[in-house]
Amino acid sequence: MKGVTAMSKLDKYRGIIPAFYACYDEEGNVSGERVQALTRHFIEKGVKGVYVNGSSGECIYQSVEERKLIIENVMAAAKGKLTVINHVACNNTKDSVELAKHSESVGVDAIASIPPIYFRLPEYSIAAYWNAISEAAPNTDFVIYNIPQLAGTALTMSLFAEMMKNPRVIAVKNSSMPAQDIQMFKTAGLAAKDDFVVFNGPDEQFVAGRAIGADGGIGGTYGVMPELFLKLNELVEAGEKKKACELQYAINEIIYKMCSSRANMYAVAKEILRTNDSVNIGGVREPLENMQEADKVIAHEAAAMVKAAMERYLV
C-alpha cells in the first residue's frame, strides 16, 4: 500500500528544518568555526535538521571549495544529531557532481538541487542534470528544489513525472508561492512511490502549506525564530487552527519587518542572531547589501518582535 507508514524511513525529514546561513569571519572568508557554532545553536534549539548551502547560505556567491568547507564543518558538529540536506547545484554539471560526491563522502542524509540557471534548458536537459548529480551520490537521497522565482524554471508535472523514475528522489522543497503546488507534488509523489515528502518553502504560508499536505518546512527565517516555527508546527499537528493562524500572522509581521530594511534580509537575520542569541556569523557577501546604521535599527526592532512573540506564544 502506497502512502505514509507508521515508521517511515523518511520521517527524519518531517519537521522544522532551518535553511543554514553563510558564516563568515571579519574579513568575509568562510569560517569553519562559526559554521560549527551555528550548527550547535540549531541542535540546542531542537530543530529536525538543517538545509545547507542553499539560497540562505549564499551558495551562488561561493566557490566549490568553500561549499565543501561549509558542509564538512556542519557534519563535524551535526552528524547523528540533525538531519542534514546539502544543496549542491552549481551552474554546470561538473561542479555539481563534484559537490554531490563530496556530500556523500561526509555522510549527509540528502543532497538537493535547483535546476540549471541562466540558459533556458529543455526539460530533458534538466532531468539529465539532476540525474547526473544523483548518480554521483548513489547512496544518498535526492531532493528537488523548486524555486521558479529565482531559478527562472518551474518544476512542471511532466518533469516531475520523469524524475519520479529515479529511486533516490524522495522529496521536493517547494518554494513556489501557490500552496496548490504542494498538493500536486504530494499527490503525484505518493502515486509513484511508497512514501514521498514535500517541504513548504515560503515561510509566510507555513500553515497553508502544512494544511494542504506539506510534511514540514525548510525556511530562510526559521533560523532567527526556530522556537516560533517549532510551536507553529506543533499547533498545526494538534489541529489548533485558530492559534496556528494567530501565530503565523505574528511571524509574518516579523518577516515583513525584516524585509523592510535596505540591507539584504539575510544580513538582517544575522544581526537578529547576534542580538538575541549572541551568535556572530558575520555579514553577507557582496553584491548582497550589508548592514548600515539605519538597517540595524530595523533589525533590532525585528529582534524585539521575536522576543515578544516568544513571550506571548510559547506557553
Image: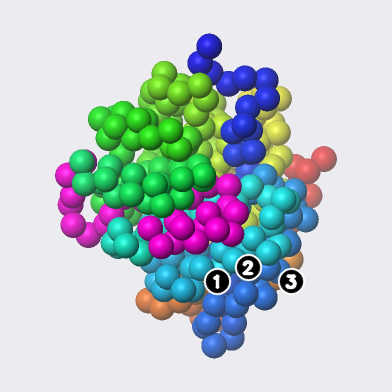
Q: Residues within 10 Å of mark 2 (few under 14, many from 20)?
A: some
Residue designated by label 2: 73
Q: Quadrant of residue 231?
A: top right
Residue at the spot 18% in from the left edge and 57% down from the top edge: 119
Residue 293 placed where, x, y %?
55, 81
Which residue occupies the foreground of this view, 271 or 89? 89
Q: Is residue 266 left or right of residue 129?
A: right
> What amino acid is found at the position of numbered circle 1 in the picture?
Leu
- State whether residue 228 is above or below residue 184: below
Q: Say whether marks 1 and 2 touch (CB < 8 Å).
A: yes
> What amino acid is found at the position of numbered circle 3 in the picture?
Ser
Q: Is residue 109 left or right of residue 160?
A: right
Tell me the SS state at disc 2.
helix
Taking the magenta stretch, the answer to whether it contains residue 5 is no
Q: Which mark is residue 69?
A: 1
Residue designated by label 3: 278
Which residue occupies the foreground of this view, 197 or 313? 197
